[in-house]
Amino acid sequence: MSRVARLGLFIVATLAVLATGIFVIGSKEYLFRSTYRLRTQFANVAGLAAGADVQIGGVHSGTVHSIELPHKPGDKVIVVMDLDRATHEIIKRDSVASIQTEGLLGSQYLAISFGSAGQAEVKDGETIPSEPPLQMSDLFKKTSIILDSSQQAIQNATFATAHLNSVSAKIDSGQGTVGALVNDKQLYNNLEQTTTTLHDTTLKAQTGVTDFQENMEALKHNFLLSGYFKKRGYEDSADLQENEIARLPSGTPVKTFTYSPKTIFDGRESAKLKNQKSLDDVGRFLAQNHLGVAVIVVSAGMEGDAQKELILTQAQAMVVREYLVGNFAFDDSQLKTLGMGKQTGAGSEAGWGTIQVLIFPAGTDVPPNKQGAAGIASKTAESPIPASAAVAPKP
Protein backbone atom coordinates (compact mmCIF):
# COMPACT_ATOMS: atom_id res chain seq x y z
CA MET A 1 0.00 0.00 0.00
CA SER A 2 1.35 3.36 -0.98
CA ARG A 3 2.07 6.15 1.40
CA VAL A 4 -0.84 8.23 0.05
CA ALA A 5 -3.27 5.36 0.57
CA ARG A 6 -2.11 4.83 4.13
CA LEU A 7 -2.49 8.55 4.80
CA GLY A 8 -6.00 8.55 3.34
CA LEU A 9 -6.99 5.53 5.40
CA PHE A 10 -5.69 7.21 8.57
CA ILE A 11 -7.66 10.37 7.83
CA VAL A 12 -10.85 8.38 7.16
CA ALA A 13 -10.44 6.42 10.41
CA THR A 14 -9.79 9.59 12.35
CA LEU A 15 -12.88 11.23 10.90
CA ALA A 16 -14.96 8.11 11.73
CA VAL A 17 -13.80 8.16 15.36
CA LEU A 18 -14.45 11.86 15.56
CA ALA A 19 -17.94 11.47 14.06
CA THR A 20 -18.73 8.61 16.43
CA GLY A 21 -17.63 10.68 19.42
CA ILE A 22 -19.69 13.62 18.29
CA PHE A 23 -22.70 11.36 17.78
CA VAL A 24 -22.36 9.72 21.23
CA ILE A 25 -21.85 13.00 23.03
CA GLY A 26 -24.60 14.66 21.03
CA SER A 27 -27.03 11.85 21.81
CA LYS A 28 -26.29 12.12 25.53
CA GLU A 29 -26.72 15.88 25.38
CA TYR A 30 -29.82 15.52 23.19
CA LEU A 31 -28.23 17.58 20.38
CA PHE A 32 -29.86 15.50 17.65
CA ARG A 33 -33.27 14.91 19.24
CA SER A 34 -36.34 17.08 19.81
CA THR A 35 -36.35 18.48 23.36
CA TYR A 36 -38.20 20.96 25.52
CA ARG A 37 -37.01 22.94 28.51
CA LEU A 38 -38.25 23.01 32.11
CA ARG A 39 -37.13 24.83 35.22
CA THR A 40 -37.16 24.10 38.93
CA GLN A 41 -35.83 25.86 42.04
CA PHE A 42 -33.84 24.72 45.08
CA ALA A 43 -32.56 26.49 48.16
CA ASN A 44 -29.39 24.35 47.84
CA VAL A 45 -28.46 22.14 44.87
CA ALA A 46 -26.09 20.01 47.05
CA GLY A 47 -23.33 19.76 44.43
CA LEU A 48 -25.49 19.25 41.34
CA ALA A 49 -23.62 20.43 38.25
CA ALA A 50 -24.55 21.43 34.71
CA GLY A 51 -24.58 18.42 32.38
CA ALA A 52 -25.86 16.08 35.10
CA ASP A 53 -28.41 13.43 34.18
CA VAL A 54 -32.14 13.98 34.48
CA GLN A 55 -33.96 10.71 35.18
CA ILE A 56 -37.66 9.96 35.01
CA GLY A 57 -38.67 6.65 36.56
CA GLY A 58 -35.00 5.70 36.73
CA VAL A 59 -34.50 6.22 32.96
CA HIS A 60 -32.08 8.80 31.54
CA SER A 61 -34.41 11.28 29.85
CA GLY A 62 -32.53 14.58 29.74
CA THR A 63 -29.66 16.69 31.02
CA VAL A 64 -29.19 19.70 33.28
CA HIS A 65 -28.63 22.58 30.86
CA SER A 66 -27.54 25.20 33.37
CA ILE A 67 -27.70 26.28 37.02
CA GLU A 68 -28.38 29.93 37.74
CA LEU A 69 -27.59 31.61 41.04
CA PRO A 70 -30.22 33.95 42.53
CA HIS A 71 -29.96 37.68 41.97
CA LYS A 72 -30.61 38.60 45.61
CA PRO A 73 -30.46 36.89 49.01
CA GLY A 74 -33.54 34.89 49.86
CA ASP A 75 -34.20 33.74 46.30
CA LYS A 76 -33.62 30.17 45.18
CA VAL A 77 -31.16 28.58 42.77
CA ILE A 78 -32.73 27.97 39.35
CA VAL A 79 -31.98 24.66 37.60
CA VAL A 80 -32.67 24.60 33.85
CA MET A 81 -33.01 21.19 32.17
CA ASP A 82 -33.56 19.90 28.67
CA LEU A 83 -35.86 16.88 28.42
CA ASP A 84 -36.70 14.45 25.65
CA ARG A 85 -39.95 15.40 23.91
CA ALA A 86 -41.26 11.85 24.58
CA THR A 87 -41.46 12.59 28.32
CA HIS A 88 -44.00 15.33 27.74
CA GLU A 89 -46.86 12.88 28.21
CA ILE A 90 -45.83 11.70 31.69
CA ILE A 91 -44.57 14.94 33.23
CA LYS A 92 -47.48 17.01 34.54
CA ARG A 93 -47.77 20.18 36.58
CA ASP A 94 -47.79 18.20 39.83
CA SER A 95 -44.53 16.37 39.00
CA VAL A 96 -41.80 17.03 41.57
CA ALA A 97 -38.06 17.41 40.94
CA SER A 98 -35.57 16.16 43.50
CA ILE A 99 -31.78 15.85 43.71
CA GLN A 100 -30.62 12.25 44.19
CA THR A 101 -27.22 10.61 44.65
CA GLU A 102 -25.96 7.54 42.80
CA GLY A 103 -25.09 5.19 45.64
CA LEU A 104 -23.80 6.52 48.95
CA LEU A 105 -21.04 8.77 47.62
CA GLY A 106 -21.82 8.89 43.88
CA SER A 107 -22.53 11.90 41.70
CA GLN A 108 -25.78 13.84 41.88
CA TYR A 109 -28.54 13.68 39.31
CA LEU A 110 -32.00 15.21 38.98
CA ALA A 111 -35.03 12.91 39.35
CA ILE A 112 -38.54 13.89 38.27
CA SER A 113 -41.64 12.02 39.45
CA PHE A 114 -44.54 11.01 37.21
CA GLY A 115 -47.48 13.38 37.20
CA SER A 116 -51.13 12.58 37.91
CA ALA A 117 -53.43 11.55 35.09
CA GLY A 118 -55.89 14.38 35.71
CA GLN A 119 -53.27 17.17 35.75
CA ALA A 120 -52.47 19.44 32.82
CA GLU A 121 -49.32 18.98 30.75
CA VAL A 122 -46.37 21.28 31.33
CA LYS A 123 -45.39 23.85 28.74
CA ASP A 124 -41.94 24.65 27.37
CA GLY A 125 -40.08 26.88 29.83
CA GLU A 126 -42.51 26.23 32.74
CA THR A 127 -41.33 25.77 36.35
CA ILE A 128 -42.25 22.60 38.25
CA PRO A 129 -42.16 22.17 42.07
CA SER A 130 -39.22 20.60 43.88
CA GLU A 131 -38.33 19.05 47.22
CA PRO A 132 -35.14 19.82 49.19
CA PRO A 133 -32.27 17.34 48.79
CA LEU A 134 -31.04 15.08 51.57
CA GLN A 135 -27.51 16.19 52.45
CA MET A 136 -25.00 13.75 53.88
CA SER A 137 -23.92 16.26 56.53
CA ASP A 138 -27.47 16.39 57.91
CA LEU A 139 -27.64 12.59 57.81
CA PHE A 140 -24.37 12.26 59.73
CA LYS A 141 -25.59 14.82 62.29
CA LYS A 142 -28.81 12.85 62.90
CA THR A 143 -26.83 9.62 63.17
CA SER A 144 -24.57 11.21 65.76
CA ILE A 145 -27.60 12.28 67.83
CA ILE A 146 -29.04 8.74 67.66
CA LEU A 147 -25.72 7.25 68.78
CA ASP A 148 -25.54 9.67 71.72
CA SER A 149 -29.08 8.69 72.75
CA SER A 150 -28.24 5.00 72.46
CA GLN A 151 -25.15 5.47 74.61
CA GLN A 152 -27.22 7.22 77.28
CA ALA A 153 -29.78 4.39 77.19
CA ILE A 154 -26.99 1.84 77.67
CA GLN A 155 -25.69 3.79 80.67
CA ASN A 156 -29.19 3.88 82.19
CA ALA A 157 -29.57 0.14 81.65
CA THR A 158 -26.21 -0.47 83.32
CA PHE A 159 -27.23 1.65 86.31
CA ALA A 160 -30.59 -0.18 86.59
CA THR A 161 -28.81 -3.56 86.45
CA ALA A 162 -26.46 -2.53 89.24
CA HIS A 163 -29.43 -1.37 91.32
CA LEU A 164 -31.23 -4.68 90.77
CA ASN A 165 -28.10 -6.56 91.82
CA SER A 166 -28.02 -4.52 95.05
CA VAL A 167 -31.70 -5.27 95.74
CA SER A 168 -31.18 -8.98 95.01
CA ALA A 169 -28.26 -9.08 97.45
CA LYS A 170 -30.40 -7.51 100.20
CA ILE A 171 -33.21 -10.02 99.55
CA ASP A 172 -30.75 -12.93 99.70
CA SER A 173 -29.44 -11.68 103.05
CA GLY A 174 -32.99 -11.45 104.47
CA GLN A 175 -33.24 -7.66 104.63
CA GLY A 176 -36.63 -5.97 104.24
CA THR A 177 -40.15 -7.43 103.96
CA VAL A 178 -39.50 -9.31 100.72
CA GLY A 179 -36.27 -10.71 102.12
CA ALA A 180 -38.09 -11.91 105.22
CA LEU A 181 -40.76 -13.59 103.12
CA VAL A 182 -38.17 -15.34 100.98
CA ASN A 183 -35.96 -16.49 103.83
CA ASP A 184 -38.52 -17.04 106.66
CA LYS A 185 -40.59 -20.09 105.77
CA GLN A 186 -43.03 -19.68 108.67
CA LEU A 187 -43.91 -16.09 107.69
CA TYR A 188 -44.50 -17.21 104.12
CA ASN A 189 -46.81 -20.04 105.25
CA ASN A 190 -48.85 -17.64 107.44
CA LEU A 191 -49.25 -15.19 104.56
CA GLU A 192 -50.28 -17.96 102.18
CA GLN A 193 -52.86 -19.24 104.69
CA THR A 194 -54.31 -15.71 105.08
CA THR A 195 -54.54 -15.30 101.30
CA THR A 196 -56.32 -18.64 100.96
CA THR A 197 -58.83 -17.63 103.65
CA LEU A 198 -59.58 -14.31 101.90
CA HIS A 199 -60.01 -16.12 98.59
CA ASP A 200 -62.48 -18.59 100.12
CA THR A 201 -64.43 -15.73 101.72
CA THR A 202 -64.64 -13.92 98.36
CA LEU A 203 -65.90 -17.06 96.64
CA LYS A 204 -68.57 -17.52 99.30
CA ALA A 205 -69.68 -13.90 98.91
CA GLN A 206 -69.91 -14.29 95.12
CA THR A 207 -71.89 -17.51 95.58
CA GLY A 208 -74.26 -15.71 97.95
CA VAL A 209 -74.86 -12.92 95.45
CA THR A 210 -75.50 -15.44 92.68
CA ASP A 211 -77.96 -17.36 94.86
CA PHE A 212 -79.75 -14.11 95.74
CA GLN A 213 -80.10 -13.22 92.05
CA GLU A 214 -81.43 -16.70 91.27
CA ASN A 215 -83.93 -16.44 94.13
CA MET A 216 -85.17 -13.08 92.88
CA GLU A 217 -85.56 -14.50 89.37
CA ALA A 218 -87.54 -17.40 90.85
CA LEU A 219 -89.75 -14.96 92.75
CA LYS A 220 -90.57 -13.22 89.51
CA HIS A 221 -92.03 -16.48 88.18
CA ASN A 222 -93.67 -17.55 91.48
CA PHE A 223 -97.45 -17.78 91.08
CA LEU A 224 -97.96 -15.53 94.13
CA LEU A 225 -95.93 -12.64 92.59
CA SER A 226 -96.19 -13.30 88.85
CA GLY A 227 -99.32 -11.15 88.62
CA TYR A 228 -97.43 -8.10 89.92
CA PHE A 229 -94.67 -8.39 87.34
CA LYS A 230 -97.10 -9.11 84.53
CA LYS A 231 -99.00 -6.01 85.53
CA ARG A 232 -95.82 -3.98 85.27
CA GLY A 233 -95.21 -5.38 81.80
CA TYR A 234 -91.43 -5.30 82.03
CA GLU A 235 -88.73 -6.74 84.29
CA ASP A 236 -86.03 -4.16 83.63
CA SER A 237 -86.76 -0.46 84.07
CA ALA A 238 -84.08 0.27 81.46
CA ASP A 239 -86.74 -0.75 78.87
CA LEU A 240 -88.36 2.64 79.42
CA GLN A 241 -85.36 4.42 77.94
CA GLU A 242 -84.34 1.91 75.28
CA ASN A 243 -85.68 4.17 72.51
CA GLU A 244 -86.02 7.45 74.47
CA ILE A 245 -84.11 10.50 73.27
CA ALA A 246 -82.76 13.28 75.46
CA ARG A 247 -84.55 16.11 73.66
CA LEU A 248 -86.70 16.91 70.66
CA PRO A 249 -84.98 17.18 67.24
CA SER A 250 -84.31 20.66 65.94
CA GLY A 251 -86.59 21.90 63.20
CA THR A 252 -90.33 22.00 62.54
CA PRO A 253 -92.43 18.81 62.31
CA VAL A 254 -94.14 18.16 58.95
CA LYS A 255 -97.01 16.35 60.67
CA THR A 256 -98.40 16.26 64.23
CA PHE A 257 -100.92 13.81 65.71
CA THR A 258 -102.44 14.75 69.09
CA TYR A 259 -104.43 12.51 71.44
CA SER A 260 -105.75 12.59 74.98
CA PRO A 261 -104.45 9.76 77.20
CA LYS A 262 -108.05 9.41 78.42
CA THR A 263 -109.06 7.98 75.03
CA ILE A 264 -106.01 5.71 74.72
CA PHE A 265 -105.42 4.26 78.22
CA ASP A 266 -107.86 2.67 80.67
CA GLY A 267 -107.01 4.84 83.67
CA ARG A 268 -105.50 8.12 84.83
CA GLU A 269 -102.44 6.34 86.24
CA SER A 270 -102.30 3.42 83.82
CA ALA A 271 -100.27 2.54 80.74
CA LYS A 272 -102.64 -0.19 79.57
CA LEU A 273 -104.10 0.43 76.11
CA LYS A 274 -107.88 0.33 75.80
CA ASN A 275 -108.51 2.08 72.47
CA GLN A 276 -105.31 1.40 70.52
CA LYS A 277 -107.13 1.48 67.18
CA SER A 278 -107.20 5.25 67.52
CA LEU A 279 -103.46 5.15 66.79
CA ASP A 280 -103.90 3.43 63.41
CA ASP A 281 -103.87 6.70 61.45
CA VAL A 282 -100.36 7.35 62.82
CA GLY A 283 -99.23 3.83 61.89
CA ARG A 284 -100.56 4.16 58.33
CA PHE A 285 -98.84 7.52 57.89
CA LEU A 286 -95.52 6.09 59.11
CA ALA A 287 -95.84 3.08 56.79
CA GLN A 288 -96.75 5.12 53.69
CA ASN A 289 -94.35 8.06 53.97
CA HIS A 290 -90.57 8.50 53.98
CA LEU A 291 -89.62 10.35 57.15
CA GLY A 292 -86.54 11.46 59.03
CA VAL A 293 -87.54 10.75 62.62
CA ALA A 294 -90.82 10.46 64.55
CA VAL A 295 -91.09 11.13 68.29
CA ILE A 296 -93.87 10.00 70.63
CA VAL A 297 -94.10 12.77 73.25
CA VAL A 298 -96.23 12.11 76.34
CA SER A 299 -96.87 14.83 78.95
CA ALA A 300 -98.77 14.61 82.24
CA GLY A 301 -100.81 17.25 84.04
CA MET A 302 -99.68 19.02 87.16
CA GLU A 303 -101.31 16.56 89.58
CA GLY A 304 -99.47 13.77 91.40
CA ASP A 305 -95.85 13.07 92.31
CA ALA A 306 -93.32 14.42 89.80
CA GLN A 307 -91.12 11.30 89.75
CA LYS A 308 -94.07 8.92 89.35
CA GLU A 309 -95.56 11.07 86.59
CA LEU A 310 -92.23 11.07 84.74
CA ILE A 311 -92.04 7.26 84.82
CA LEU A 312 -95.72 7.03 83.83
CA THR A 313 -95.21 9.20 80.72
CA GLN A 314 -92.13 7.17 79.76
CA ALA A 315 -94.13 3.95 80.11
CA GLN A 316 -97.09 5.30 78.09
CA ALA A 317 -94.77 6.46 75.29
CA MET A 318 -93.10 3.04 75.22
CA VAL A 319 -96.48 1.21 75.00
CA VAL A 320 -97.67 3.43 72.12
CA ARG A 321 -94.40 2.74 70.29
CA GLU A 322 -94.72 -1.02 70.83
CA TYR A 323 -98.24 -1.00 69.35
CA LEU A 324 -97.17 0.96 66.24
CA VAL A 325 -94.03 -1.15 65.65
CA GLY A 326 -95.93 -4.41 66.16
CA ASN A 327 -98.81 -3.59 63.79
CA PHE A 328 -97.33 -1.48 60.97
CA ALA A 329 -94.33 -2.00 58.69
CA PHE A 330 -91.80 0.86 58.76
CA ASP A 331 -88.24 1.57 59.89
CA ASP A 332 -88.74 1.33 63.66
CA SER A 333 -85.24 2.71 64.32
CA GLN A 334 -86.61 6.13 63.35
CA LEU A 335 -89.44 6.01 65.93
CA LYS A 336 -88.32 7.45 69.29
CA THR A 337 -90.02 8.23 72.62
CA LEU A 338 -89.86 11.13 75.05
CA GLY A 339 -91.59 11.08 78.45
CA MET A 340 -91.91 14.67 79.67
CA GLY A 341 -93.50 14.08 83.09
CA LYS A 342 -95.50 16.94 84.62
CA GLN A 343 -95.96 19.87 82.22
CA THR A 344 -97.90 23.09 82.69
CA GLY A 345 -100.84 23.25 80.29
CA ALA A 346 -100.32 19.65 79.15
CA GLY A 347 -104.04 18.83 79.48
CA SER A 348 -107.26 20.08 80.90
CA GLU A 349 -109.22 16.86 81.51
CA ALA A 350 -108.53 16.19 85.20
CA GLY A 351 -104.79 16.30 84.69
CA TRP A 352 -104.71 13.58 82.01
CA GLY A 353 -102.03 15.32 79.93
CA THR A 354 -101.43 14.86 76.17
CA ILE A 355 -99.96 12.42 73.67
CA GLN A 356 -98.34 13.83 70.55
CA VAL A 357 -96.61 12.06 67.65
CA LEU A 358 -94.30 14.59 65.96
CA ILE A 359 -93.02 13.60 62.51
CA PHE A 360 -89.92 15.40 61.21
CA PRO A 361 -88.72 15.49 57.56
CA ALA A 362 -86.02 13.30 56.05
CA GLY A 363 -82.50 14.48 56.89
CA THR A 364 -83.38 15.55 60.44
CA ASP A 365 -80.60 14.68 62.89
CA VAL A 366 -81.70 12.20 65.55
CA PRO A 367 -80.78 13.43 69.08
CA PRO A 368 -78.80 11.00 71.24
CA ASN A 369 -80.55 8.49 73.47
CA LYS A 370 -80.81 9.27 77.19
CA GLN A 371 -77.77 8.09 79.07
CA GLY A 372 -77.58 6.37 82.41
CA ALA A 373 -80.19 3.60 82.33
CA ALA A 374 -78.85 2.54 85.73
CA GLY A 375 -79.72 5.97 87.11
CA ILE A 376 -83.31 5.55 85.96
CA ALA A 377 -83.39 2.14 87.59
CA SER A 378 -82.27 3.64 90.91
CA LYS A 379 -84.90 6.36 90.66
CA THR A 380 -87.53 3.69 90.00
CA ALA A 381 -86.40 1.87 93.13
CA GLU A 382 -86.70 5.04 95.21
CA SER A 383 -90.11 6.07 93.80
CA PRO A 384 -91.66 2.97 92.25
CA ILE A 385 -94.46 3.44 89.76
CA PRO A 386 -97.80 2.57 91.34
CA ALA A 387 -99.46 -0.66 90.28
CA SER A 388 -102.23 1.22 88.53
CA ALA A 389 -99.65 3.00 86.36
CA ALA A 390 -97.96 -0.21 85.37
CA VAL A 391 -96.85 -0.82 81.81
CA ALA A 392 -98.87 -3.44 80.02
CA PRO A 393 -97.39 -6.06 77.69
CA LYS A 394 -97.65 -5.62 73.93
CA PRO A 395 -101.26 -5.95 72.78
Image (cartoon, helix red, strand yellow):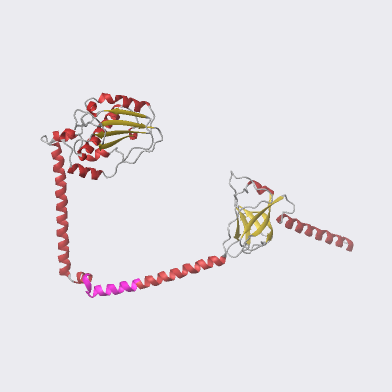
Q: Using the image as rendered, state which of residue 50 and residue 370 is in the foreground.
A: 370
- Extent of the magenta region: 160-177
Q: Quadrant of the C terminus?
A: top left
Residue at the image point whose x is 26% and y is 24% from the top: 277
Q: Position of residue 129 (x, y in %)?
A: 60, 53
In the picture shown, does residue 105 fall above or below 335? below
Q: In the drawing, does residue 151 fall left or right of residue 97?
A: left
Residue at image location 31% in from the left, 73% down from the top: 165
Q: Is residue 242 above or below residue 135?
A: above
**Quadrant in which residue 371 is drawn:** top left
Which of the 4 image quarters holds residue 2? Answer: bottom right
Residue situated in front as seen by the camera: 226 or 174 = 226
Q: Is residue 280 left or right of residue 177?
A: right
Q: Quadrant of residue 383?
A: top left
Residue 49 x/y as whole percent: 67, 62
Q: Is residue 75 magenta?
A: no
Q: How many marks?
A: 0
